[in-house]
Image: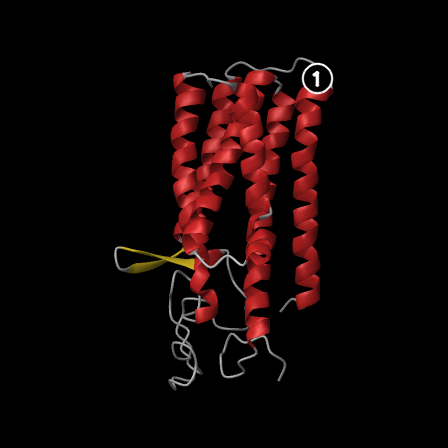
Amino acid sequence: MPRPDSERSGALFYLGASLIALCFLPFAAFGIPLPAATLPWQRQIIGAAFSAICLLGALAGISPSTCSRLSPSKPKLGEPSRTANTNSGGPIGRRVQKQGHHATCSNYGSHVVHIAGAVHCAGCTGLVLGAATALAGSTLYFFVGIPLPCPLFAFWLGFAGVALGLLQHPLYALFRTRRGGVRVVVNITFVVGAFLLLSSVADLTGNLMLEAFLLLAILYWIFTRIAMSRRSHREICTRCGDKGCPLSEAPD
């Protein structure tokens, strides 16, 4: 099991590197003369690669337990625990039941949304909806050939959306976010922002190397978002201190 300090440092490293990559983009797109670098069917190739990333992200959002674990030595979120205390003294009981792949605990109340009587992870729901929107936009732009109305505005809108998505967990803590719907909107904005960045860079520069760099950056941003989410989950369980919970990170 990774130590909390090392996991926290790793997540912050991911975040710092992601923000550096994001801030590099305006300089690369507008401030650095780029040599011409194009390929036949370049737009379709870039679009296909981005669509594949969206599909993988959507699959991860639909089945989040494969990429969101607190620890391999403890029960996974969403799985019943054999050692769980079922007394009613704790919040919502002590069993680790599936609640949008989070523990059925009031500490995770802001991490879930209720849709048609079912409980879903707010972040994953936003990622799936964002991926569906980005896929539709990718099809229209990269394959149908519908241009962006204002590439420069789309670039900065996408920049802001990705920055918000990367910084979402510190912002949730800062503003004490208690509504899962906010997390849904933020994660939709994160994915759609990545699409706007990629399509606007394709319009403004048409440079293959910069587009390839951006695709790699998008993949890295996704891993950063997962790392920050895992860090947030671990901190919730650490602060809880309920030793009767099988997911507790409290010292024995």
Colour mode? secondary structure
Q: In which quarter of the image is the N terminus?
A: bottom right
Q: Which residue lies furthest to the front in this view?
A: 175
Name the residue located 68 percent from the left edge and 34 percent from the top edge: 23
The residue that disc 1 covers is: 34
Where is residue 87 shown, x and y percent of the image?
39, 86
Asked whether 34 or 46 is in front, the reply is 34
Where is residue 172 shown, x and y percent of the image?
55, 55
In this picture, is 166 found above or below 113?
Answer: above
Q: In which quarter of the view is residue 19 placed?
A: top right
- In terms of secondary structure, where does tag 1 sit? loop
Q: How many marks?
A: 1
Where is residue 232 shown, x and y percent of the image?
57, 61
Q: Relative to 78, is 212 on the left or the right? A: right
Q: In this view of the protein, can residue 125 be seen by the observer?
A: yes
Q: Residue furthest left?
A: 116
Q: Which amino acid does label 1 sit on?
A: Leu
Q: Relative to 242, is 118 on the left or the right? A: left
Q: In which quarter of the view is residue 70 placed?
A: bottom right
Name the residue located 42 percent from the left edge and 62 percent from the top edge: 101
Asked whether 138 or 235 is in front, the reply is 235
Name the residue located 70 percent from the left edge and 51 percent from the top edge: 13
Where is residue 43 shown, x and y percent of the image?
50, 19
| Label 1 crowd (10 A; few <14 / some 14-19 / many >=20) | some
Q: In this view of the protein, can residue 71 be seen by the observer?
A: no
In this picture, is 47 found above or below 85?
Answer: above
Name the residue located 61 percent from the left edge and 54 percent from the top edge: 170
In this picture, is 57 found above or below 27?
Answer: below
Q: In which quarter of the image is the C terminus?
A: bottom right
